[in-house]
Each structure stands twice: as structure tokens, then as C-alpha cells.
């Protein structure tokens, strides 16, 4: 049921209204709608992911019990923990350490000025 809401919610997402278009003075309501939609959409996605992981864990335990095999739940949670850790590290890197495209263009322009000042080629690609 939650999956159906997730799909329908994705189709009903509020659209981005261009700021420069005449007659779009109502951008604050659009921003609030997208923000609220984003909270619910991401929240439902996290809940679905958690429920899926719990279901896999229960299935592995049930399989190990019924067929007297090795319990693979610790290995599964190790993989899940690794995925969560890598995702968290990449989020921190993207949030705090990665330069934005605006900063990159500014740095490139400064390097071009230094290159030209040193007698380098003025044309860049």
C-alpha cells in the first residue's frame, strides 16, 4: 500500500515554477508545497526501505530455522551497515567538502587569469 502511495505521490509532485515568468508571483506557496511533498516522499521511502530490510532479516532467520542452515542475518546486517555508512560518508562529503559549480567556475577563472598573466594561452576550452 505504501508503495502505491509512493508512486502516486511521485506523479502528483508539485512542479517548479520559474521565477522569471510573468504571473508567477506565488512562488512561496510552491516552495512550501514542494518542501512538504519532499518530506513525505522521502519519509515514505525511508519507511519502505526499513520495512524491506526487516522483511529480509525475518526471511533469512526463517530459512535458517526451517532448513537447519547457517544464519546469515549478521552478514546481512553487516552489508546494510556498510551501505548506510558509505551513504552517510558520501552525503557528508557532498554537503561539506565538494565545491559547487559556481565555486568551480570562479576558481577556473582565477586560474585562467594566472595563466594569461604568466604568458600562457588565452584561449581555453
Image (cartoon, helix red, strand yellow):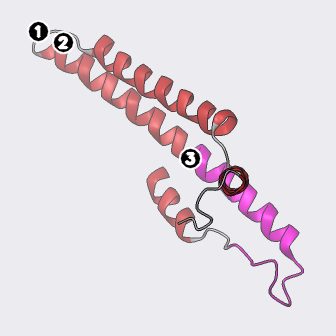
- Look at mark 2 in the image and give the residue it sits on: 65
Q: Which of 121 and 71 is in front in this view?
A: 121
Residue at image point 59% right, 71% down: 12
Q: How would you rate the neighbour count of disc 1 (Cα within 10 Å): few for under 14, some for 14-19, many for 20 or more?
A: few
* Magenta range: 16-44
Q: How would you rate the neighbour count of disc 3 (Cα within 10 Å): few for under 14, some for 14-19, many for 20 or more?
A: some
Residue 116's place in the image compared with 83, above or below, is below
Residue at image point 18% right, 14% down: 64
Front: mark 1 or 3: 3
CA separation, marks 3 and 2?
31 Å
Q: State yes or no: residue 23 in magenta.
A: yes
Residue 68 screen position, x and y as percent = 11, 9
Mark 2 secondary-structure assignment = helix
CA separation, marks 2 and 1?
5 Å
Find residue 68 and name its label.
Answer: 1
- The answer to whether the residue labelled 1 contacts the one labelled 3, judged by CB atoms less than 8 Å apart, is no
Mark 3 secondary-structure assignment = helix
| Numbered disc total | 3
Residue 1 screen position, x and y as percent = 45, 53
Find residue 122 and name its label.
Answer: none
CA separation, marks 1 and 3?
36 Å
- The answer to whether the residue labelled 3 contacts the one labelled 2, judged by CB atoms less than 8 Å apart, is no
- The answer to whether the residue labelled 2 contacts the one labelled 1, judged by CB atoms less than 8 Å apart, is yes
Amino acid at each position: 500500500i505504501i508503495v502505491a502511495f509512493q508512486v502516486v505521490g511521485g506523479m502528483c509532485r508539485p512542479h517548479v515554477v520559474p521565477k522569471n515568468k510573468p504571473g508567477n508571483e506565488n512562488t512561496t506557496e510552491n516552495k512550501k508545497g514542494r518542501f512538504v511533498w519532499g518530506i513525505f516522499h522521502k519519509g515514505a521511502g525511508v519507511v519502505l526501505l526499513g520495512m524491506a530490510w526487516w522483511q529480509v532479516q525475518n526471511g533469512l532467520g526463517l530459512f535458517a530455522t526451517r532448513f537447519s542452515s547457517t544464519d546469515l542475518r549478521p552478514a546481512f546486517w553487516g552489508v546494510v551497515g556498510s551501505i548506510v555508512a558509505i551513504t552517510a560518508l558520501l552525503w557528508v562529503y557532498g554537503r561539506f567538502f565538494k565545491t559547487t559549480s559556481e565555486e568551480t567556475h570562479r576558481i577556473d577563472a582565477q586560474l585562467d587569469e594566472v595563466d594569461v598573466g604568466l604568458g600562457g594561452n588565452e584561449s581555453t576550452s
